[in-house]
Image: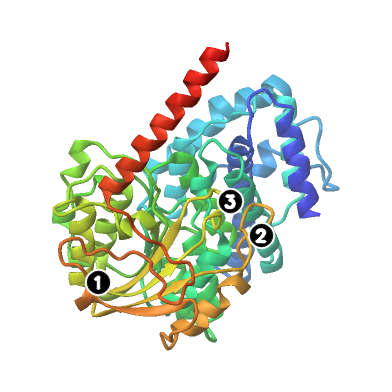
Amino acid sequence: MFEQAFKNIDNVLWKDAGCSSELDYVEQTSWILFLKYLEDLEQERKTEAALAGKGTYTHIIATKFRWHNWAVPKTSDDKIDHNKAMTGDDLHDFVNNDLFPYLKKFKQSAESADTIEYKIGEIFSQLKNRIQSGYNLREVLNIVDELRFKSQKEKHELSHLYEAKIKNMGNAGRNGGEYYTPRPLIKTIVKVVAPKIGDTIYDGAVGSAGFLVEAFEYLMKSKELSTKDIETLQKKTFYGKEKKSLAYIIGIMNMILHGIEAPNIIHTNTLAENLADIQEKDRFDVILANPPFGGKERKEVQQNFPIKTGETALLFLQHFIKHLKAGGKAGIVIKNTFLSNGSTGDAYVSLRKYLLETCNLHTILDLPGGAFSGAGVKTIVLFFTKGEPTKKIWYYQLNPGRNLGKTNPLNEKDLAEFVELHKTKSASENSWTVNVADLNTKTFDLSVRNPNSNDEVTLREPKEILKEIEKLDKKTDKILLSIRQKL
């Protein structure tokens, strides 16, 4: 039922002039789902208050703006009241001119940023209704009204479908891929880092909140939870920051669907924070993240960091190290160029040296190209603990025995050997250990060089490479000259 409902929503949005891509479909579905979720949440709280004898329940949303009054008003026999249900221009104008302005005001009136009231205001301050036809909007509202958020089973099924939509969006272009990290990889990172109840867990590049969601799922299954444990998971465990409006909204919605009622995600540019201002209260026990690759930050943002660079990934890594508590653990995805780029005095070299001196970089997982939905970007995962220098690094080179891509994605079985061998840091065909004392202290090059590999790679000197290029250029010139003469 739920799967068909999502398909039906996409079919309606596909024919609307205001929605042109999978990103738009997810964004518009998200705000409507969110309001239906609020309706079900309020009904649940009202029932609980009555059963507990607490008297009248105070609604978050004013009467006029509750789902059952504006979105899908019903008759006494629980059917849509077509006399009251707005459609066409009336519905479109009400949503744009009344509903959204009302919901935006919650940001100012909320008691604090960790309340659901604040999240309502933040979400509706960051987006707009893109559905141009009030008739299409009416169709979507009717479909969403059939969905229920009341039982854990319903929420679980909806969360899986929403994840599938995020994955599709990640494959849809227009920078959609930055929102989606393969879930088998996230689950593996969470298993290896192994957070526990009571840890604070942070992702400063939260995207669709995949790391926080999987850490929540992991901890929910970690032991028999007490009421106090559940409250800790709901309010004092998961924290995130996100710069982009769409990712922020998707991240919040994803966490809500997975059972976290008021996600502690802040809509901000994480890198605008000056690292010199970080205090102990700002630090976390666990950091799990996949910061954006290839981005550039302005000079004024770079001033917030001791190691100056425009590369967002390098700035994020500094941010994460600074935000870890002493003894805190991290699992960070980053491009494999981090391991070897740069020469003496360069930001890459300085950051590798800083990481090795301030943290125990105990594990590097080397991923094959194509691990990220066939994007071809070569990535690694850095696993480290803060507070003691690195002495040995255990490397694992993932070799799934096939080419990875959209139709042949990474799965948890591919990563099973890594998880098992990591427990003892054992040597194997795909794993080995490097002593930090043996590194070149001018470059701190951490390149992945599997000593067990039969594929010997000979690194050539720059002069040799330039000679080869010159030779090829001359050959090309001769071919072009020959073609011109024939013409």
Amino acid at dot 1: Lys
Q: Are the residues flagged by discs 2 and 1 in contact, CB closer than 8 Å?
A: no
Q: Which label sits on residue 374?
A: 3
Q: Secondary structure at mark 1?
A: strand
Q: What residue is drawn where x is 56% and y is 54%? A: 370
Q: Nearer the viewer, mark 2 or mark 3?
A: 3
Q: Position of residue 152 (x, y in %)?
A: 66, 68
C-alpha gap between disc 2 and disc 3: 22 Å
Whether 76 is drawn above or below 133: the answer is below
**Viewer-proximal residue among 234 and 83:** 234
Q: Which numbered disc flags the more N-terminal residue, 2 or 1?
A: 2
Q: Secondary structure at mark 3?
A: loop
Q: Which numbered disc flags the more N-terminal residue, 1 or 3?
A: 1
Q: Residues within 10 Å of mark 3 (few under 14, many from 20)?
A: some
Q: What residue is drawn where x is 25% and y is 44%? A: 272
C-alpha gap between disc 1 and disc 3: 35 Å
Q: Position of residue 450 (x, y in %)?
A: 42, 72
**Viewer-proximal residue among 103 and 337:** 337
Location of mark 1 (residue): 325
**Viewer-proximal residue among 69 and 298:** 298
Location of mark 2 (residue): 160
Q: Residue furthest top?
A: 487
Q: Which numbered disc flags the more N-terminal residue, 2 or 3?
A: 2
> Where on the picture, by quarter, is residue 311?
top left
Q: What residue is drawn where x is 52% and y is 63%? A: 213
Q: Secondary structure at mark 2?
A: helix
Amino acid at dot 2: His
Q: Position of residue 141 (x, y in %)?
A: 72, 39
Amino acid at dot 3: Gly
Q: Is residue 273 left or right of residue 394?
A: left
> Where on the picture, by quarter, is residue 192?
bottom left
Q: What residue is drawn where x is 48% and y is 51%? A: 377
